[in-house]
Image (cartoon, rainbow, N blue to C red):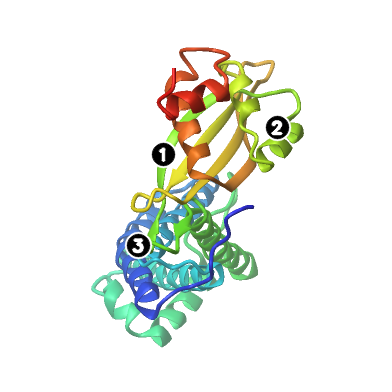
Amino acid sequence: MYYQQSGRYSLGGLFTGAAIGLAASAILAYAYGRGLILISDAHFAAFATIAFGAAVGAITGYGMVLGNVRNEKASIAVSAVVALIALYVSWAVWVAATLRSDPEASDVSWLGLALRPDALWKTICVINQYGTWTLGEGKAEATHGAELWAIWIAEAAAVIGVAPSVAVHIFHLRPFCETCGCWAERGAHLKKAAPANLTQLKRHLETKDLQPLADLEPANKDNNLSIALNSCPRCRLFHTLSLTHTTVTRSKLGRRTLRNNVILRHLIVRPEQAETLRLLSVSGNSTPGIGVTKINAAAAGKK
């Protein structure tokens, strides 16, 4: 009923994903390591760390897609390794940038430190004894010792934890047609007003009944249903349907909060149903209430 990854992969595909992830992550790691020197606020530093991990995971995830990897565990493992290496490089860059304030160590390069893990570790331990920045306003001495170790461990956990999570998200964005050996592409896409009973709508769609989709009202700003079709670009026989419920709430101060809830993820549909969805995406927003029966007749060339 629902599409599931086959779990297949090749060593070449894993190498492709890892190579793309490492190449891009090296640049990200350098920018992250140098950028942390300029960030004095702890909240911005935490945000930068999460963004760094997410970027590494996204790039590695797309690399896995390019390598036709359909194994979630392999994708998680490779993205975690890439994140670990990227974190290591960022540490070498950060330490080298920190040492530039010391006249006796200003000529130390980040590449030299990266190639000597023992020297990098010893330097990190020395920096930890004295610290380089303070955590919180009004604090006299720089954060150091056990407190600084805890912050660094949290940073590492965030990067290595976020990267695989994002990579897996990328991994599940599109289904793979095993017959043709290619990823499906985004086909029809439309938005409708969400019904009161989403569970009932899901049950109808699981029985291949698309009539409830045609009966939905046009989408509104605060409560809508995003309907997406993915199709194999080669055989045109493999199609999946995904539904996401989006709601927008406003606080008393007018702050908007957007929430997305996946109702269906890659429900397999037949070619004729996919054609129905394509026609519905064209006519559904301009002709409210058009039925699936009429759409199917149009698809068959009837009047």
Residue 216 or 54: which is nearer the viewer? Answer: 216
- Vertical order, 264 against 220 (above or below): below
Q: How crowded is mark 2: few (under 14 residues within 10 Å), some or many (20 or more)?
A: some
Instruction: Label 3: state its secondary structure.
Output: helix
Q: In which quarter of the image is the C terminus?
A: top left
Labelled disc at residue 258 = none
Q: Quadrant of residue 85?
A: bottom left
Between the residue at mark 1 and the residue at mark 3, the CA separation in whole angstroms equals: 19 Å
Residue type of the residue flagged with mark 3? Leu
Q: Residues within 10 Å of mark 3 (few under 14, many from 20)?
A: some
Q: In which quarter of the image is residue 193?
A: top right
What residue is shown with label 2? 201
Residue located 33% across and 57% down the image: 31
Residue located 53% across and 67% down the image: 6
What residue is shown with label 3? 66
Q: Which residue lies most toward the left here? A: 107
The disc, 2 or 1, on the residue closer to the chain's N-terminal end is 1
Q: Could you tell me if the residues under marks 1 and 3 are in contact, i.e. CB atoms within 8 Å?
A: no
Labelled disc at residue 187 = 1
Residue 136 or 59: which is nearer the viewer? Answer: 59
Q: Is residue 150 visible?
A: yes
Position of residue 125 in the picture relative to residue 185 (left or right): right
Q: Can residue 259 be seen in this view?
A: no
Residue located 32% across and 66% down the image: 20
Residue type of the residue flagged with mark 2? Leu
Q: Could you tell me if the residues under marks 2 and 3 are in contact, i.e. CB atoms within 8 Å?
A: no
Residue type of the residue flagged with mark 1? Gly
Residue located 76% across and 33% down the image: 200
Q: Nearer the viewer, mark 2 or mark 3?
A: 2
Residue 108 x/y as whole percent: 27, 75
Between the residue at mark 2 and the residue at mark 3, the CA separation in whole angstroms equals: 34 Å
The disc, 1 or 3, on the residue closer to the chain's N-terminal end is 3
